[in-house]
Image: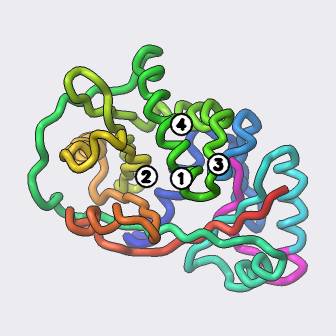
Amino acid sequence: MRRSLVDRALDVNAAMLTLGNEMFETEDATFVRNRETPSRWDSNHVSRIQASTPEAIERLVSRARNEFEGTEMLSFEVDYRTPPEVAAWLTLEGFEGAEALVMLLEGELAGKATEFEMRLVEDDGAWAEYGKLHALDWAEAQEKRTGDSKPDMAEEMLLATELKSPPARFWMAYVDGQPRSYLFSWEGEEAVGQVEELFTHPDFRHQGLATALIHHCVADARAHGAGPVVIVADPADTPKEMYAAMGFRPVGVKRAYRKKM
């Protein structure tokens, strides 16, 4: 029996987080790990958790502490299929939950996109340009969360991104010959794709770059075999409204429970 589209959407996002990383499965969960990027939680986490008894959950968390020794954060990904005892146990132990809104596009995108030059990031020069934009993205995100931009971590964050390519394809949109926005496309699994990591230079927002990239990357994912396409939004930020206006509908909420090691 074909699995539900919602489950496939949640799973393609989980699979996206494994790209470029080591992955192994245990009886109770899937472990995703990358020793080259110890500060990046999405490269080092536990997902698809099946443990439900106190003994199984404690055993899982104990193993996670050993497997992720040397990383900055211990992180567990949960969704509606995760036994509720897991979230309850992690909350009791002081893990902080962060939600993400999973949205899905099944038909065509609404509206029209302004035309911009699009280039695939595929050589050292392009990655260097991408890195400059990525450093701005990282600094802005960190200032929102903590008030501290921590620029020394930008290189590690960029490495985790580069390791996803291939199979993910990273695109930049150009204005007057300069890259000003980026997004990646991936055809995903079970005919469900994903577009992710949207960022536009602060001085070039509200000019149609983000919309153009979403149109371009959805088309690219579908050209490589995807049908429905996932995008993930921060529930506390405004891009989710743009995605909804373009035709993405909310299909699920996932939560990452994190605690400093």
Examine the structure image and report whether residue 133 is included in the region drawn in magenta: no
Task: Report the residue marked by disc 2.
Answer: 189
Label 4, label 1: how many angstroms apart (C-alpha)?
14 Å
Q: Which of 189 and 40 is in front in this view?
A: 40
Image depth: mark 3 or mark 4 in front? 3
Q: What element carries label 1?
A: helix
Label 3, label 2: how many angstroms apart (C-alpha)?
37 Å
Mark 2, other Cα within 10 Å: few <14 / some 14–19 / many ≥20: some
Q: Is mark 3 on a helix, strand or loop?
A: loop
Residue 15, which numbered label? 1
Residues under numbered marks 3 and 4 in contact, where contact means CB atoms less than 8 Å apart: no
- Specify the amino acid type for callout 3: Asp
- Specify the amino acid type for callout 1: Ala
Closer to the chain start, of discs 3 and 1, is 1
Residue 148, which numbered label? 3
Q: Is residue 118 left or right of residue 66?
A: left
Image depth: mark 4 or mark 2 in front? 4
- Specify the amino acid type for callout 2: Glu
Q: Nearer the viewer, residue 143 or 71?
A: 143
Q: In which quarter of the image is residue 216?
A: top left
What residue span does the magenta drawing correspond to?
43-57
Task: Report the residue marked by disc 4.
Answer: 161
Horizontal and vertical percent for residue 63? 88, 59
Q: In which quarter of the image is the C terminus?
A: bottom right
The number of callouts visible is 4
Seen at 58% across and 78% down, the residue is 81
Horizontal and vertical percent for residue 74? 77, 58
Image depth: mark 2 or mark 1 in front? 1
Closer to the chain start, of discs 4 and 1, is 1
Label 4, label 2: how many angstroms apart (C-alpha)?
19 Å
